[in-house]
Image: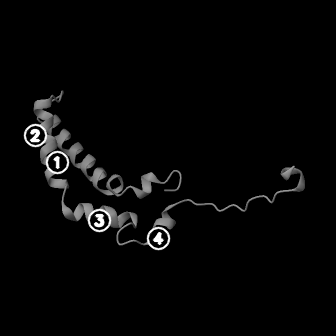
Amino acid sequence: MPPHSSHILQPLDVGYFSLLKTAYGRQVKKLMRNQFNHITKIEFLPAFRDTFNASITEKNIQESFQGTGLVLFDPDEVILKLDVQLRTPTPLTVQDTL
């Protein structure tokens, strides 16, 4: 992968985990409205399980890969998301070779 491109090319980070993070945030806000001001493992596990089960769908995972342009592989889409700046290397001079 090109440098500094993992945030674009890692499909589960781009799609699925952002959905999971958003959905879990909604669960936490729901707990807070019900007067929970500290989330223990006992409250965390059911909230995370519900969020996980709702967001880990075949459709979400497939869309994550499609969103990065990796499946169906579309190199043009991947390249458009990168901030690639091509540089022509400076030619070597006689002094550089000595």
Cα distance between the residues tagged 4 and 1: 33 Å
Q: What kind of residue is marked 1?
A: Thr
Q: Secondary structure at mark 2?
A: helix
Badge 3 is on which residue? 63
Q: Secondary structure at mark 4?
A: helix
Badge 4 is on which residue? 75
Question: Which residue is at a point 19% across and 39% down the rendered structure image?
Answer: 28
Q: Secondary structure at mark 3?
A: helix
Image: 55 above or below 39 = below
Badge 2 is on which residue? 46
Image position, residue 78 (x, y; %): 46, 66
Residue 74 visible (yes or no)? yes
Disc on the earlier residue, 4 or 2: 2
Disc on the earlier residue, 3 or 2: 2
Image position, residue 76 (x, y; %): 48, 72
Quick one: 93 or 86, which is closer to the camera?
Answer: 93
Question: Which residue is at a point 22% across and 65% down the rendered structure image?
Answer: 59
Disc on the earlier residue, 3 or 1: 1
Question: Which residue is at a point 35% across and 72% down the rendered structure image?
Answer: 72
Quick one: 19 or 35, which is closer to the camera?
Answer: 19
Cα distance between the residues tagged 3 and 4: 16 Å
Q: What kind of residue is marked 2?
A: Pro
- The tag on residue 51 is 1
Image position, residue 44 (x, y; %): 15, 35
Quick one: 93 or 85, which is closer to the camera?
Answer: 93
Image: 25 above or below 12 = above
Disc on the earlier residue, 4 or 1: 1
Q: Secondary structure at mark 1?
A: helix
Image: 81 above or below 42 = below
